[in-house]
Amino acid sequence: MNRRVWTGVAAGTLAGIAGVGTSLWRHRAENAPAPDIWGLSFPAIDGRTASMAARRGKPLLLNFWATWCAPCAIEMPLLDVFSREAAPRGWSVLALAVDSAEPVHRFLTERALSLPVALAGPGGIELSRRLGNSVGALPFTVAFGANGEVRDRKLGRLDEAILERWLREVH
């Protein structure tokens, strides 16, 4: 065989191995048990501590976002409204910023948002991966039932339809 054929065979083999590895990694991430989030706490943007244990026993919307993420910025006002409207129905909402305090504070102030926000920092991406975000992209949202089970996940920007569905179906 000539050199081009061997190069093609080698490249194809490497691509196949990489594809299998990626598939196995995604399968592991999607099927890994969710972390026990109820034992976690995060520094809240208001200076308090956002304890996940305080949210136990009610439906929870956990949103991973960042100030530099354009789709995140677009969905934040929608999450703010959802937070206010879902609270009387027993829901808890927490927006976990994969960011630092200063840009998050500025972002929230400029937009007059009042939903609960805490700082996950760079470790937030890893936590989101452990919750099923196989690609580590933002925004990523997880809906938990009152029993603590993951009921649904959404990678990418939320819309009113999915939030309304979660309000109806997640208890």
Image: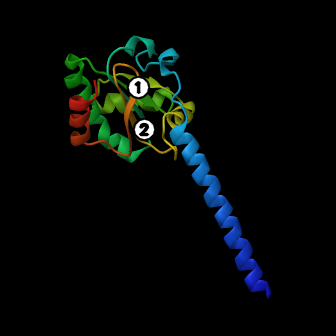
* Among the 4 quarters of the image, the one containing residue 93: top left
Residue 152 in the image: above or below residue 118? below
Label 2 vs 1, first from the N-terminus? 2
- Left of 94 or right of it: where is 27? right
Percent x, y for residue 46? 40, 16
Percent x, y for residue 90? 25, 17
* Among the 4 quarters of the image, the one containing residue 150: top left
**Mark 2, mark 1: which one is toward the viewer?**
1
Circle 1 sits on which residue?
149
Residue 82 in the image: above or below residue 67? above
* Among the 4 quarters of the image, the one containing residue 73: top left
The residue under the point 63% across, 57% down is 20
Other residues around mark 1 within 10 Å, as few (<14) / some (14–19) / many (≥20): few
Residue 110 in the image: above or below residue 55? below
Residue 48 visible to the viewer: no
> What amino acid type is highlighted by mark number 1?
Glu
**Where, quadrant-wise, is the N terminus in this rendering?**
bottom right
Percent x, y for residue 160? 22, 40
The residue under the point 45% across, 32% down is 103
- Left of 133 or right of it: where is 16? right
The residue under the point 52% across, 43% down is 136
Secondary structure of residue under mark 1: loop
Q: In the image shown, does 122 or 56 lie closer to the viewer?
A: 56
> What amino acid type is highlighted by mark number 2?
Thr
Residue 76 visible to the viewer: yes
Percent x, y for residue 31? 52, 39
Secondary structure of residue under mark 2: loop
Q: In the image shown, does 102 or 131 lie closer to the viewer?
A: 131
Circle 2 sits on which residue?
67
Residue 13 in the image: above or below residue 91? below
Q: Alpha-carbon distance for marks 2 and 1?
A: 28 Å
**Where, quadrant-wise, is the C terminus in this rendering?**
top left
